[in-house]
Structures are given as structure tokens and as C-alpha cells.
Amino acid sequence: MAQEKRDYYEVLGVSKSATDAEIKKAYRKLAMKYHPDYNPGDKDAEEKFKEVNEANEVLSDPKKRQMYDQYGFAGVDPSYAAQNGGGAGGFGGFGGADGVDLGDIFGDIFGGGFGGFGGSSRQANPNAPRKGQDIRVRITLSFDEAVHGCKKNITITRQQECTECHGSGCAAGSSPETCPDCGGRGYVIRQQRTPFGVMQTQQPCSRCGGKGKLVKNPCKVCHGSGKTATKKTLEVSIPMGIDDDQSFALRGMGDAGTNGGPSGDVIVMVTVRPSEVFQRDGYDVWVTVPITYSQAVLGDSVTVPSIDGKVEYTVPEGTQSGTTFRLRGKGIQYLNGRGRGDMYVKCEVEIPKKLNKAQRDALKKFEGTLKEENYEKRKGFFKKLKDMFA
């Protein structure tokens, strides 16, 4: 007899703030406790199992859980389990009741390897098209090459379809045979009777190596593999603005696929050697320019290196050491080509050394003409000291 529906969180014994992991753990525990194969003939356990399964179906789905939290049972389909549920499995195994396979539960707990408990196996078709392996290549660029882009040649060794047998692995006039041990599935099922019933495990077929087919008369060129290793040199266009540790893909240039599957890619990973002049920050460039004492005091036009060549920049009079100026649009081009970063010029005032007597006397005479207002920072500093010790 149908009972009034209980709150899904109450069914699983978790709080409304429970994490996905907590919900999954609670569900597995209750699903094993009430599974019909553990409780043959127990109608109450069967109903509780359906209730647990229904609660998990909603709470394990982020969208359904959100709707349930907001609108309650009206936000989800309350008749889902009844419309799609199945009967309890028989004693012959742990066939899924209400669509739940205990093999999935045990697989989650023990890390896989369980094909099911008397139910159907779900193994990938070994004869299905499979994409080829990707090939990874690392190249080293100079700072200038990365900034402006360039062309580089790379040499790879890729597995390509054998031109002699066209990928079949068989000699001319022959074809692969279906493996008699696995029937072409690529795996075999082992059964073991346990206190819980008959446990099934899936293992790769040892005779065909999981391929599902046997090559009786192998190709003399590829020796039955269907592929041959070939060296190939590719000219790679390095995009402008690429940075250290970035990568890009050459689609379809990797190893050939299997059973008609697409080829893999070549992943080009980039290392950029640092510049002796520039420092990079994203698409911005920083450069430190030494200026003389007189240039800092009087101001001057100085030559500044940029990634596009030399530029002239007017340093204003009274420039302090460490002052940074921004040159918009003089940085590195964005990878998408839509704009550029900026260049930052940091001025470093170089104090002269090893002055002769005439230079010292001239400097002292000049210093004697200066007043306190000529030194804004010095004036402010001593005022703070005066206030501190007043």
C-alpha cells in the first residue's frame, strides 16, 4: 500500500546542506541494505529500496536538487520511479532492480573491475573507431621569436596506417578472424559465487589482447600491428604573443586512429628564454632605463628600447629614481590579434662615481644654491620628524 512520500533528505538520512559525496555515500549504504537481492520476498525492503533510489535520483542531480529545494515534490516528477522501476532481481544473480546494478555500487566502493552481478556487461566495443594518440613536442623560443611570431621546424615520429595492409595487420589476401575465446568482444567474463550471489568480473581477453580479433597471417611490413612508425618534419607557425608554458595543437597530425577513428593531435608546448632587456607581464613589457643625474634634474629626451625598435621619450625635469612611465599600445600583441599591451619604462637615476676635484667643487657650489623647497620629499620627511619629537 502506497505511503505518504517522505522528504528525500530524510530518506537518505542526510542534512539539506549535505555535499554530493555525503549523498552518494548514504545512498550506497542504503541501496545495499535494502536491495531486493539481499532481502528476497521482503516487500517492505523492496519499497524502501525504491524510495532510496528515487531520493538519490533527485538529490544526485544538481538541477533536480535545486528544483526540489525550491518547490518540493512539485518541482520534480514524483511518479518517475513508479513509471520506470523494475521488479526485484532473482536469486540467479544481482540483476538491477529499479535500474540499479549492484555492480555499479561495488565498483564505486572497490575501484572498478566489477562487470555486474548477473546483469549485462557494459564494455567498450574493441572494434569501435578510436582516436589516435596525441604527440607532445616542446620547443624553445627566444623572447623576440615569441613576441613577433616565427616559423619553426619540428620532427616527430608518428604511428601511421600501414600502407601495405591498410591498417588491417594482415598479409595480402587474408583478413582478421573473430577471437573464439571472447567472441569479438575483447573481454571475457569470470563468475564467482559469493555469499551475496554470483559475482561477475570482466577481464581483457588474453588470447586477442582485448582487440576481439586475431591476425593469423600478419603483414610483413607492420608485423600485424596495422601501423608503422614514420618520422616526419612539420613547419610550425608560432603565433605572435605566445608566452612561456603555453601550448597549441596541430589538429590531426598525431598518431593514426584505430578502426577508422580520427588521428590524434600534435601538442606543441612552448618554452621562452628570458630577455636580457625586457621583462614580460602578460601582454605588457617592462624595461629599466638608466638616466644621468643631470637628465633627471633638467629633463631630457632619452632613447628607450622597445620590442619594435628604439623610441625617443622625453623624461620630465625632476624625475626621481624609480619613476615609471606608461607607453600605451607599445606592448605585445594579443594572441587573438585584437590589440596590444603597454610598455612601462622605469627610470633609474645613476649617481656618478670617481669625481675629480673640479667636479666636486662645482657640485658643492651648485648644492649651496639650492633651498629647502627644492627637495619636496626631504622637506616633508624632516617635518614629520619634527612633529614626532615635538
Image: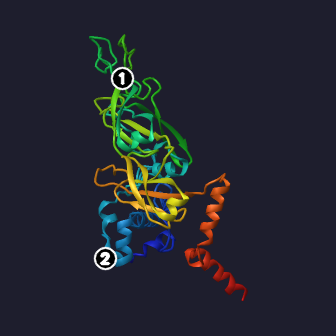
In depth, the one of 385 and 146 nearer the eye is: 385
User: What amino acid is at disc 2?
Assistant: Ala
**Residue located 35% across and 40% down the image:** 149
Residue 265: x and y in percent read 35, 35
In depth, the one of 188 and 291 nearer the eye is: 291
Measure how far apart labels 2 and 1 are at the Cα level: 62 Å
In depth, the one of 343 and 138 nearer the eye is: 343
When asked about the image quadrant of residue 228, the answer is top left
State the mark number for residue 151. Answer: none
> Of circles 2 and 1, which is in front?
1
**Residue located 73% across and 86% down the image:** 389
Q: In the picture provided, is 152 more to the left or to the right than 20?
A: left
Residue 20's place in the image compared with 254, above or below, is below
**Residue located 66% across and 53% down the image:** 356
- Residue at the spot of label 2: 74
Q: Could you tell me which quadrant the C terminus lies in? A: bottom right
**Residue located 33% across and 42% down the image:** 239
Residue 110: x and y in percent read 55, 48
Q: Is residue 165 visible?
A: yes
State the SS at label 1. Answer: strand
Q: How many dots with numbers? A: 2
- Residue at the spot of label 1: 232
Residue 319: x and y in percent read 50, 65
When asked about the image quadrant of residue 373, the answer is bottom right
